[in-house]
Image (cartoon, rainbow, N blue to C red):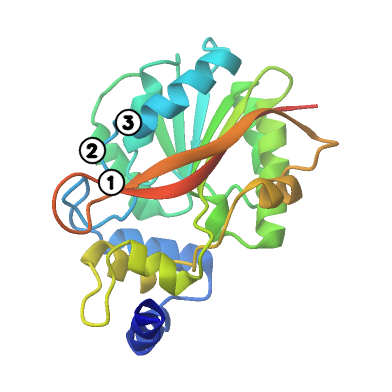
Amino acid sequence: MLRIIGQLLMVPEVARLARRTPRDPATAWEGYWSGVRTTGTQGEVLWDADIGPEAEQYTRVMEASMDFTLPVLDVGCGNGRWTRWLAAGFPTAVGVDIAESAVQRARQETGGIGAISFRTLDLTDPGTGHMLHEEYGDMNVFVRGVFHVLRGRQREQLGQNLHSVVGRHGRLLLTETNYRGNPLSYMQSLGATRGSIPLPLRKAIGGIPVPGHFGPGERRAAFPEEAWKVLADGPVTIEAVPMGGEGTTGIPGYFATMGAR
């Protein structure tokens, strides 16, 4: 009962912050990234925790399914943290993001490291997957925390474009947050209370589209079985920046590795 009361007391502040979010996703993401001052574990970006145990979960499934001679695409790359991690295992790593400010920051934080490139691209636009395939051929794809902030048609279109990107030989690793409680309960799990919402969470509530669940059911809708074969899937822990104290914050998640039929 106390937890429910706490959620109700949070409603006015959460509603006030949410009203700031632009309706157009591209505008929202550009506004979010242009306002970011610091990244990393002690920074403002909720999902930009240091890469550690979370990556170990992905390494095993990638080694079991991916051809590491192919290039890799990082969808929704943000400031490029995971693109840089991917670049260590693939000949070329390409990070794409809808926000130009994110791409600029990724380039700044990456410097001249390895065979990495970044570009501003909305992969929910029809034809963008075919365009990338024309340029790079079959690619492996890494998607972390993108589909859960998209709505139905956007998810379908992104799935279709990624089908073009992977071609015959590429593989896709999808990993998404999958907290099954209501949004207020989710915020409480990340450290929000009536009187205090941690800065990384506050910036997300007031700047980007509202997240949703993404598990096996949502995956089947975005990646229909007649087009995709699932090679492995299951629970995973997504790391977020700490909301108090030391270490990182673990969020229940879901992963799937897939290939195109």
Q: Check disc 2 and report the residue beneath it.
A: 109
Q: Determine which of the numbered discs, if any, sits on residue 260 in the image.
A: none
| Crowdedness near tag 3: few (<14), some (14–19) or many (≥20) residues, C-alpha within 10 Å | few
Q: Residue reaching furthest front?
A: 1
The residue shown at (63%, 52%) is: 124
Quadrant housing the N terminus:
bottom left
Q: Residue reaching furthest top?
A: 69
Q: Nearer the viewer, mark 2 or mark 3?
A: 3
The residue shown at (86%, 36%) is: 226
- Is residue 60 in sight in this rendering? yes
Amino acid at the residue labelled 3: Pro
Q: Is residue 15 left or right of residue 44?
A: right
Q: Where 259 sits versus 4, above or below?
A: above
SS of the residue at dot 2?
helix
Q: Determine which of the numbered discs, if any, sits on residue 105 in the image.
A: 1
Q: Residue 116: x and y, percent? A: 38, 26
The residue shown at (30%, 46%) is: 48
Q: In the rendered structure, are the residues bearing label 1 and label 2 in contact, judged by CB atoms less than 8 Å apart? A: yes
Q: Where 43 sits versus 114, above or below?
A: below
